[in-house]
Amino acid sequence: MVYHQYHNKLYFYILKHTQSVYLAEETVQLTFIKLWEKKETLSFDYELSFQVFRIAKSIMIDLLRKQSVQHRHMGQFTEEAAVLHMEFDLSKKEELQRVYHCIEQLSPVRRHVFKMSRFEGLSHKKIAEQLSISPRTVENHILRAVHQLRKALLMLMAVAAVRDLLF
């Protein structure tokens, strides 16, 4: 009953203040979740509408803060990525050679599954059928291959950076 009574009012109140459909929906959902979790501790001294909107306001502020921090970190990340890109300006051919070299360092089964997925464009289900393994095993092989490749490529980039600094 409370949900039906305040859902639209709350949604449009948050939408008006944030100009974001996502934030409005997220705030409304989190507000009613928190209201349900704290239903025993609600005060009889204040109207329910006041308490609902107060919860919503604090959740909205939290979400806006989180969003602000994310944007700030993304800005730093893109700046760092640009610097890294300039510092590690390798030719495309060298980059591909390094990637292929790292792929060849994978275990035979993992390498085969990874190539079937990335180079041949096969789905996890098709790979599983061809290799007589479960789709979950295929997914695990691919996830581990990507993780292993990422670590190896980062290591190669770090070595190249140190080499550039020394010479």
Image: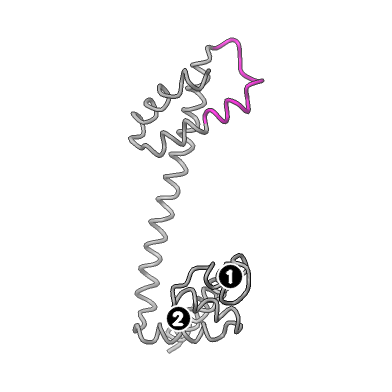
Asked whether 14 or 76 is in front, the reply is: 14
- Most common secondary structure along the magenta stretch: helix
Element type where label 1 sits in the image: helix
Above or below, 97 against 56 in this view is: below
Q: Residue at x 53, y 28 (%)?
A: 32
What amino acid does circle 1 point to?
Answer: Val
Crowd around label 2: few <14 · some 14–19 · many ≥20 (10 Å): some
Using the image, tell me which numbered label, if any, was put on residue 138.
Answer: 1
Q: Residue at x 59, y 77 (%)?
A: 131
Asked whether 73 or 150 is in front, the reply is: 150
Q: Position of residue 137 (x, y in %)?
A: 62, 69
What amino acid does circle 2 point to?
Answer: Ala
Crowd around label 1: few <14 · some 14–19 · many ≥20 (10 Å): many
Element type where label 2 sits in the image: helix
Asked whether 91 or 140 is in front, the reply is: 140
Give the Cα separation between the discs numbered 1 and 2: 34 Å
Instruction: List the residue tagged with mark 2.
Output: 161
Q: Are marks 1 and 2 in contact (CB under 8 Å)?
A: no
Number of marks? 2
- Among all residues in the image, which is located at the extreme top? 45
Q: Position of residue 106 (x, y in %)?
A: 58, 82
Q: Is residue 88 magenta?
A: no
Q: Tell me where the magenta segment starts and ends, as one range.
A: 31-46
Q: Residue at x 61, y 83 (%)?
A: 107
Q: Position of residue 3 (x, y in %)?
A: 50, 22
Using the image, tell me which numbered label, if any, was put on residue 72.
Answer: none
